[in-house]
Image (cartoon, rainbow, N blue to C red):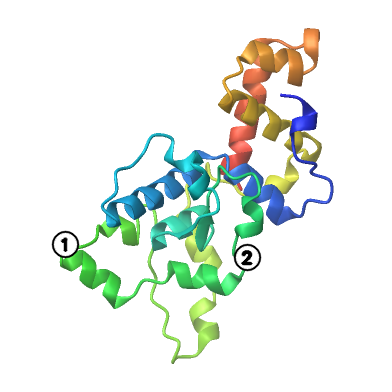
Amino acid sequence: MSADDCPNPLGWCESRWRWEFLRRSPKVRSAFSLALCKRYQSKKMEIPNGYMALEENLELVLAISPQEAARVGYAALPNPVNPDSFNLLDHQTLSFHEARRITLWDLELVAAGANEALDVFSVNQLPIIFDPSAPIAPQLEGLAEYLLSFRHPSVRDDPRKQRGDLWFSYLRILDAREAGYTYAQCAERLCGGTTASDQTARDRVRAAQRLQDRM
C-alpha cells in the first residue's frame, strides 16, 4: 500500500489515466476474461486457476466482440492485470471503428447458431447503417444528438470536471481493496490517518468507482 510501490503518474496523458482506471474496472476485466476463456476453449484446453495472472498470459492482446469493443472503448484488450499493459494498447481510431463494425458474416454466424446475438450487440446498444457509397456528411448530421436521445439521464461522461488531484489516490485505494486491505486499513494509510474513518475510505472507493464508470 506504500506510494513507493505505485507507478509514478507524473506526465501521464489523458489516455493513460483512462486506461489505468478502466483496467481495474469489472467491465474491462470481464471482457478480457471472456476473450481469454474463449481462447482456451478454441484450443480445447482446460482453463487453469488464476489464468489471467499467469506469466504466459500477461503480454496477450486479445480481439473482442463488436459489442464489447463499443462498451469498453477499445479495439482489442491487453491483459488488464499487467501493470505495463498501456504500452500494448492500440490507440488508432481506425482500429476502434473497425472493431465495432458489424458485417453480414456476423449475422450469418448468429443465424447458423455458431455465435450469440449478444456478441454482436447488446440490448443497450444501437446498430445504425452507414453507406460509404453515399455522401458522408448527411449520414453524420445530428448523430450525436440522436444517440444522446437514447441515453439514460443518470449517465454522464465528463470526468475532467472531477478533482484531478484525487485521481492517483483513487487508483491506490482501488488497488488496496483488490489486495484485500480492509476499509479501516485504507482509512488509516490512504485517507488521512487517525482523522479518517471507515466511512471515509468507503466514500473514496465509491467516488473512484463512479469515475471508473464515466471513463
Query: What residue did someone put label 1 on?
Result: 113
* Observer-nearest of 126 and 170: 170
Label 1: few (<14), some (14–19) or many (≥20) C-alpha neighbours in 10 Å: few
Say which residue appears at 48% left-offset and 80% top-offset: 139
Q: Quadrant of residue 207?
A: top right
Q: Is residue 14 left or right of residue 81?
A: right
Q: Earlier along the polypeptide chain: callout 2 or callout 1?
A: 2
Q: Residue furthest right?
A: 10
C-alpha separation, residue under disc 2 versus residue under disc 1: 33 Å
* Residue 146 rendering spot, x and y as whole percentages: 48, 65
Residue 25 sits above or below residue 56 on the image: above
* Residue 200 rendering spot, x and y as whole percentages: 69, 16
From the image, which quarter does the N terminus lie in? top right
* Observer-nearest of 45 and 173: 45
Q: Quadrant of residue 50?
A: top left
For the question of whether residue 129 can be seen, the reply is yes
Q: Quadrant of residue 132?
A: bottom left
Specify the amino acid type for callout 2.
Answer: His
Residue 57 sits above or below residue 92 on the image: above
Q: Is residue 14 left or right of residue 107?
A: right
* Residue 174 rendering spot, x and y as whole percentages: 62, 30
Specify the amino acid type for callout 1.
Answer: Gly
Q: Is residue 123 left or right of residue 11?
A: left
Query: What residue did someone put label 2 on?
Result: 91
* Observer-nearest of 1 and 177: 1
Say which residue appears at 68% left-offset and 46% top-offset: 159
* Residue 131 rendering spot, x and y as whole percentages: 41, 85
* Observer-nearest of 118 and 159: 118
Label 2: few (<14), some (14–19) or many (≥20) C-alpha neighbours in 10 Å: some
For the question of whether residue 158 can be seen, the reply is no
Say which residue appears at 46% left-offset and 68% top-offset: 99
Label 1 element class: loop
